[in-house]
Amino acid sequence: MAHIERIVREAYSPYIARNGATPGPMRDDYPARVAQGAVYVLESDGVIQGLTVLIPEPDAGCMLLDNIAVSPSAQGNGFGRALLDWAEEISRKAGFSSIRLYTQEVMVENIAIYMRHGYVETHRATEIGLNRVFMQKPLE
């Protein structure tokens, strides 16, 4: 559990100064998410390097990609893209027709990555004091 929480803390801490608020993933209850079976980790050389949190939303017909984080020391190795591709594949195999996510407006680098990966913005809203961008991608 400590590895998961450390990765999230290290990956999202730089955004605190930019946004003036603690990012949502840093507020999450990871022991509860792990108990729900929603946390998936990516290991390399026996070390957890990244994670994703997936939450099925059967009523909406989609999977929520609630979080994706890679250890800053492991960034640049394609782990983020691998986690994103994996999340989409798992969502497809689970029978969902789309996958959705949200991120903060200030995380412009992440928004650009998602757009390059085929996600489109659906709307913007303020939740828990954070200005969020909501995105979705159809799964074929």
Image: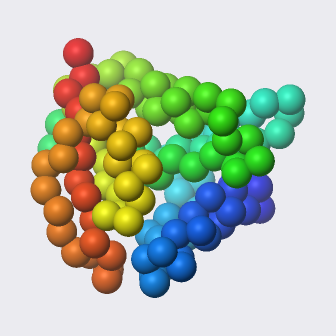
Q: Residue at x 25, y 58 (%)?
A: 133
Looking at the image, is 53 positioned above or below residue 80? below
- 39 displayed left or right of 93: right
51 or 105: nearer the viewer: 105
Q: Is residue 93 left or right of residue 1?
A: left
Which image quadrant for residue 119?
Answer: top left
**Quarter occupied by the N terminus:** bottom right
- Give the tally of numbered discs: 0
Residue 59 x %, y %: 16, 45
Residue shown at 67%/41% (left/top)? 75
Q: Looking at this view, is 8 or 90 the one in front?
A: 8
The quarter of the picture where residue 21 lies is: bottom left
Depth check: 140 or 70 in front?
70
Residue 63: tell me if it is visible: no
Q: Residue 128 appears at what percent x and percent y?
A: 32, 80
What residue occupies the far top of the structure in this picture?
Answer: 140
Q: Position of residue 52 (x, y in %)?
A: 53, 44
